[in-house]
């Protein structure tokens, strides 16, 4: 069987890219596209040892482990040894899962050699399956009850409230793609000016948004977001929100969260509506 070096290189670059991106998705890590592509290309270059007979000793298990440590160090942004090891183990798991998917197809179809396009297709489908399966089931696991107590931090203020799990809340900031949690504006009494607590947020427009902006302090203004959304059968609407430092649910923390401001009824049993795919 003839193996073309350029195709083999591209195949490994794209597979490394899929593995890294999937790992980021599973761990909610911020993606740095330059680091991801550099690590993917390094993985592709390492695979070219296959064509250099005098360098095949670099393919032994010890060098492979060292190289994986290097790839993880280059590709991901992490804090501390614990997070690095967690990322490393997840990277190994994703690698095994995607490789296993390809061997599964080969075994059950009897294909002797898969084309690069088919390998990338299988890898992509496996990557999407793993990411979506993980999001849905982890969301169910973390938020298995209808209501959960959550903690939200903005600067030195910590807000605790009862949140309702709503699978229909799929709002995201269109620019950053950060998920939006709808929160009762009255929970932000220590953060927003009193005047803004009693505004009607249900019919938000740009004029109201401008009024809110003019009332915010500079340190809160930098967190201000406007999120457009559309409900079936209606025109486009707006939600104004604030970017939080982090969200904590049962010890599971997530940064890059937008708090969409809303008015909740006095007899409401909850103060926030949580997107189940935040983790």
Image (cartoon, helix red, strand yellow):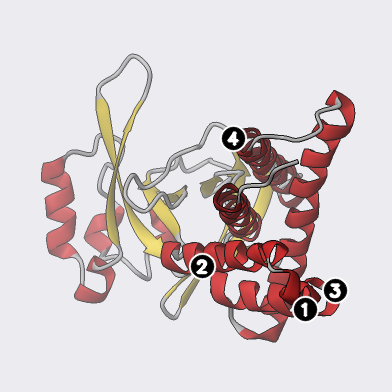
Which sits earlier in the primary sequence, circle 4 or circle 3?
3
Task: Report the number of discs.
Answer: 4
Q: Nearer the viewer, residue 89 or 136?
A: 89
Q: Is residue 195 visible?
A: yes
Percent coordinates x, y for residue 158 in the rendering: 50, 72
Tell me how far mark 3 sits from mark 1, CA to CA.
6 Å
- State the residue position of label 4: 117
- The residue labelled by disc 2 is 246
CA separation, marks 4 and 3? Answer: 28 Å
Residue 259 placed where, x, y %? 42, 54
Quadrant, the C terminus: bottom right
**Residue 155, quarter of the rendered image:** bottom left
Q: Secondary structure at mark 1?
A: helix
Q: Tell me if 156 is positioned left or right of 275 in this view.
A: left
Q: Nearer the viewer, mark 2 or mark 3?
A: 3
Question: Do the residues bearing badges 3 and 1 touch, measured as CB atoms within 8 Å?
Answer: yes
As helix, strand or loop, the secondary structure at mark 3 comes to helix
Q: CA distance from mark 2 to mark 4?
A: 40 Å
2 or 3: tag closer to the N-terminus: 3
Residue 61, label in figure: 3
């Amino acid at each position: 069987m003839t193996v073309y070096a350029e195709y083999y290189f591209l195949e490994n670059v794209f597979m490394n890219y899929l593995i890294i991106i999937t790992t980021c998705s599973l761990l909610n890590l911020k993606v740095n596209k330059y680091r991801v592509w550099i690590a993917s290309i390094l993985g592709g270059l390492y695979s070219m040892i296959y064509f250099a007979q005098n360098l095949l000793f670099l393919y032994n298990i010890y060098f492979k482990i060292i190289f994986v440590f290097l790839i993880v160090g280059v590709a991901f942004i992490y804090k501390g040894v614990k997070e690095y090891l967690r990322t490393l183990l997840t990277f190994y798991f994703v690698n095994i899962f995607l490789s296993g998917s390809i061997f599964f197809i080969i075994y059950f179809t009897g294909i002797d050699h898969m084309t690069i396009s088919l390998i990338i297709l299988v890898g992509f489908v496996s990557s999407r399956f793993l990411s979506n399966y993980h999001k849905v089931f982890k969301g169910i696991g973390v938020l298995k009850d209808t209501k959960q107590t959550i903690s939200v931090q903005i600067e030195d203020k910590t807000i605790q409230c009862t949140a309702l799990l709503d699978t229909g809340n799929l709002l995201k900031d269109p620019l950053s793609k950060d998920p939006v949690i709808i929160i009762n504006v009255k929970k932000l009494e220590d953060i927003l000016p009193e005047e803004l607590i009693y505004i009607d947020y249900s019919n938000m427009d740009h004029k109201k948004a401008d009024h809110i902006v003019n009332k915010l302090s500079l340190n809160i203004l930098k967190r201000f977001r406007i999120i457009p959304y559309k409900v079936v059968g209606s025109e486009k609407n707006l939600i104004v929100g604030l970017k939080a430092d982090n969200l904590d649910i049962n010890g599971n923390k997530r940064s890059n969260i937008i708090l969409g401001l809303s008015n909740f009824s006095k007899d409401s049993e909850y103060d926030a509506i949580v997107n189940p795919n935040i983790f």
